[in-house]
Image (cartoon, rainbow, N blue to C red):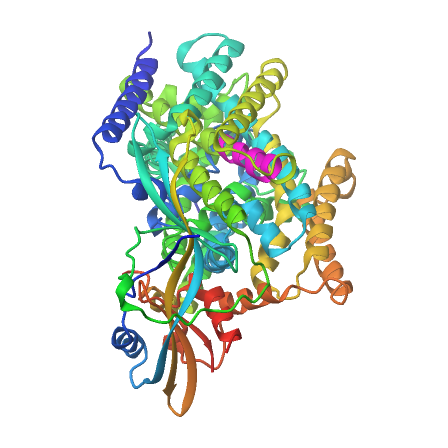
Amino acid sequence: MNELVLKTLVDDQDAQRILAAKAPGLRVESAKLRHHPFAGFIFEVPQLAGRSGQAHALVDYYSGKAFVCDPWQAEDAETGQVLDRVADPQWNTIDFDTARRRAKALLSTAALRRARLAWRGGVREKSSVAKVWKPNWMVEASLEKKSYRVMVDGLNGGYFIIGS
Amino acid sequence: MFGLPAFTTMVIIGVPALWVIYTAVFLWLSRGWKREDAKEQQ
Amino acid sequence: MSIEILFLVIYFIAMAAIGFWAMKRGKQDAEGFLLGGRSLGPGVTALRLQSSSMSGYMFMGAGSMGYTQGYFSMWYALGDLGGGILNLSVLGRRMRKLSQILGSITSIEYLEHRYPSKWIRLIAAPVALFCMFFYVLAQFIAGGRGLEMVSGVSFPVALAIAIGVIVLYTFLGGYLAVAYTDFVQAIIMVVGMVWILVATLMAVGGFTKGNETVGGINPNLLTMWGADLGYQGQWGVILGALLVFSIGYMGWPHVVVSHMAMKKPSVARTAGVYSLVFNLLFIPGPYLVGLFALILLPNLANPETAIFEVADAVLPTFAVGIVMAAIMAAIMSTADALLLQAGTIASQDIYARFINKKMSDAQMVWVSRITVLALAIIGYGIAAFDPPAVAAVVIFSTTVLGSAFVPSYICAVWWKKANTVGAISSMAAGTLVSVLWQVSGAPDATGIDPMVTGILASTAAMVIGSLASQKSHPVPEHIGRALDETAKIGPIPKKMLMGQDALLASQAEMAARGE
């Protein structure tokens, strides 16, 4: 079973800056890196006029959601960091084959939408990674004497407020 | 006006005016939506 | 070959050639090709909303209603004016956010994700498919009539050609889409319509003069009550006319799907303004041209062709070619959007969901193609031998779609207690009541439009069904959380609230859970 850890592109300083830019005065108390498991696929997607292209897709094991994403950058192997893995909540957890089906369905639908009925199909899986660990920052922050928990995406810096 | 009965004139001007007012009120109420974009523009 | 046909052919060959060239030359990246979803800006969103819904009805139905009913037909236009802004302000932003959090691609799938039960799709998909077929039928008839007029061949032949071209379009549209977008179509539609309207107004001596002349023919046409004042005081009918294209519009699966493709949730705001401006320019046109056709062409055999005939009469020859090409292009691409959506419903929402869960992409393409061909053949069968009135067909299918889906789509984002039982009862009640009301002749007997009874029934069913089953079928926890995120009002700084990455919602949820 192959695994891959995605490189953390947004470090804790960046995360702090992103949040502070949104809410001046916000102070980050702590930031902890957590890793969330995805199934990763690379597909060859035929397009029109004999062209084809490559597409990367990730499927969240825990929620079953699939999305198309940028090519992955893997973390160097020798960093030897210990991952703080997010535990399986067992709500909508899916297995690898389901994930593969969802990723493929996502790409076929998207391709058909764009190419219309002249599309000949033939989305082909080029490679897959059973577990792609995506980094997210769990940030404890405070603002005006209230504390908040915020998740900051370790790849693109998107954030989501979990609660206060 | 326009060679139309008064009621017709009132309706064909009044109802679009209501939609324009609706739109103006909607724009006012949704003026904060733009802030939602900050991140997604990246 | 007439000049109009020549324009039509040149137009499409040019568009296809540009598209093919762009495809061959374009960069080799799958991303731009695939990520068509959730990337639309306000202009495209607004105009797509209009162009995917208006052509056939506007160019035939609206003109015919203006011609036969005078200003009474304006009630439909007046409701329609606000359809886009209402849709975008009520559903736009929230539907964009919720569909992203729930990970939905099609608008029917979205309903099933929000109201988890296979029955949702089992009911929604056939109802949507059935109504959309009628809408496609209206495009076929409009395309056939338009071609009949410009080419002079008989209607069945023109119809066959028009349907053939439309089907061809659904196959090759991927190439066209590069150059010929919904955006371009909407612009062409509005320019063409304004052109016809201005030429018509000039021909009848101005708006006031035109109204006076129409009043000389039949003064009732200038009232809001119909040619024989039959609708005077019939507020049940008038309310239905106002509601059908304003509120009913929010129930169209092929229209609301464009909310899901907006680049950012806030796009809804600007798009709403654009759609109002577009509507104010475009919508009154066909009704007025139909009305003034009474002066220019008092003896039309088929009022539905009023706009085509007026265009032919008032525009210079070269302009007739351009405007007719624009109209035909609009009709074709609306039909294409509808057929493609119908193909998606058949392949994704019916075949892959209930028949073959492991559908391959080749099967998906074939199911879509067969659906499109079947609709085309059945459509030809109906339209060639006994073409129904376009206005009646479109109003009927909008009434059913609106009654069936409006409460489900609105409550999906606005009412946390709306649950599966409520949604199923609402869709069933809305469909049954609106259809039965119409076919039983109740509108004439009671003076109440099926749009009114249909939407009342489905709203009542949603409220009663949801409230009665809160204990037995509570709204699942993860949907409740998604709705909180969609609405987002809480003890969090306002600046932070805006701009969250909805994709992270479930990851954040689970990470927090484990601590």
Q: Is residue C32 visible?
A: yes
Look at the image and say whether residue C102 sits in the magenta stretch.
no
> In this view of the protein, which residue sits in the foreground, C183 or C388?
C183
> In this view of the protein, which residue sits in the foreground, B16 or C106?
C106
Magenta span dominant secondary structure: helix
**Residue C288 sits in which quadrant?**
top left
Region of the chain picked out in magenta, as a range: C339-352
- Residue C232 against residue C194 in the figure, above or below: below
Q: How many labels does the image show?
A: 0
Compared across the picture, whether B12 is left or right of C33 comes to: right
- Residue C11 against residue B15 in the figure, above or below: above
**Position in image of residue A50 (x %, y %):** 31, 25
**Position in image of residue C45 (x %, y %):** 39, 47
**Position in image of residue C5 (x %, y %):** 34, 14
Q: Can residue C202 be seen in this view?
A: no
> In this view of the protein, which residue sits in the foreground, C24 or C268?
C24
**Residue A125 sits in which quadrant?**
top left
Residue located at (42% from left, 72% from top): A84
Query: Which quadrant of the rendered structure holds the N terminus of chain C?
Result: top left
Look at the image and say whether residue C343 sits in the magenta stretch.
yes
Residue located at (35% from left, 49% from top): C39
- Residue A66 against residue C312 in the figure, above or below: below
> In this view of the protein, which residue sits in the foreground, C62 or A105?
A105
Compared across the picture, whether C365 is left or right of C436 comes to: left
